[in-house]
Amino acid sequence: MVDGEKGCKPFHRPVLLKEAVDLLAPKKGGIYLDGTAGGGGHSEEILRRIIPTGKLIAIDIDPYAIKILKERLLPYKEYCKIVHGNFASFENYLEGDFFLDGALLDLGVSTEQILSTERGCSFRFHAPLNMRMDCSDSFISAWTVVNTYALEDLVRIFEEYGEERFGRKIAEEIVRRRRRKPIEYADELAEIVAKFYKGRRRIHPATKVFQAIRIEVNGEIENLKVFLGKIPYFIKRNGRIVIISFHSIEDRIVKSQFRAWEYYGWGKRIFGKPITPSPEEISENPRARSAKMRAFEFYGRNG
Ligand SMILES: C[S@@+](CC[C@H](N)C(=O)[O-])C[C@H]1O[C@@H](n2cnc3c(N)ncnc32)[C@H](O)[C@@H]1O
């Protein structure tokens, strides 16, 4: 069981809630996709604006999130289809609603996932190295990455996904340690990373390495690329997609994809620069600090 599962109360605070839904501009009767529905904050706001005639397809890869969503969105159940799945395969869940009026992705992890000891996503806990968002045994876990990946693969992940300046040194230390015995726990890994940092820091020294491993375990970059490759074929005329990312690699991918679509005349970026949370939002919810939001409107070949 995941911590906090009992009672299923969402405590994830949606980032850029009003701004994201305003940008998506949902209209009554429209069909929308929330590909990362999580605790349902954005989903609920979209639903409030599209009922009584619209429909929302709410996807999440995490079965615990699905449980929360079903409870939270119960009052809207006639207008909402909740799917346990991967947004990279969103087209499989559209059924009759083949074309969408808009889609939202709020990437990354939820507060519940970070604070769940079972996931081992946080360096603060003595928890097994897992980090799988979908909780299934079918994907690699953080344990597999840490204990079986070749040195050069670890270096690549830490440097590329974590932008970790001690990536090579940390990878070498992991490989040295695991020769004696596998690295089993999140706090054990955090301690290895922390050795390379001296003095106090604003964020925990293991933040970047944990983020990098989580991105690898869940195929987060690949999922985003697959989604972007398909979504233009499923959005109606003047339909929008809105993407909130928390990692510079993801933001770069979104930015260059939007530019390419604009170049090909498929539509327009709503803003050239990303929208970021206000200082007030960041002070109330520090998790929002790295959020960047971009939006694109398709001129429309569909619907
Ligand atoms: C930042 S949270 C979203 C929070 C949500 N917008 C809200 O208002 O509560 C990100 C969510 O995306 C989900 N997620 C991540 N990758 C996914 C994928 N490939 N397919 C579906 N859901 C995914 C995670 O399980 C997590 O619940």
Image: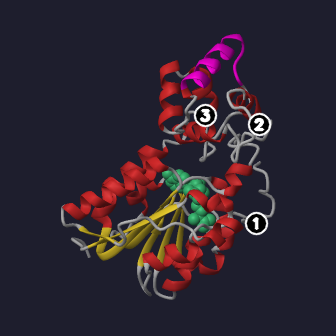
- Magenta: main secondary structure equals helix
Residue 239 x, y percent position in the rendering: 34, 75
Q: Name the residue under label 2.
A: 127
How far across and down, in percent of the image, does residue 21 sit?
A: 50, 76
Residue at the (51%, 85%) spot, across then down: 49
Checking the image for residue 273, the label placed there is none
N-term-proximal mark, 1 vs 2:
1
Span highlighted in magenta in the image: 168-183
- Furthest residue in direction left, as rendered: 264
Q: Say which mark, if any, is on residue 9.
A: 1
Which is more toward the observer, 239 or 163? 163
Residue 75 colored magenta?
no
Residue 138 point in image, percent of width and height: 56, 36
Q: Which residue is drawn at 37% across and 49% down?
A: 225
Q: In the visual, does 2 lie left or right of 175? A: right
Farthest front residue?
199
Label 3 with label 2: CB-CB less than 8 Å: no
Q: Residues within 10 Å of mark 3 (few under 14, many from 20)?
A: many
Describe residue 171's horizontal placement relative to residue 93 as left or right: right
Pick the front one: 289 or 27: 289
Q: Distance between the residues labelled 3 and 2?
A: 13 Å
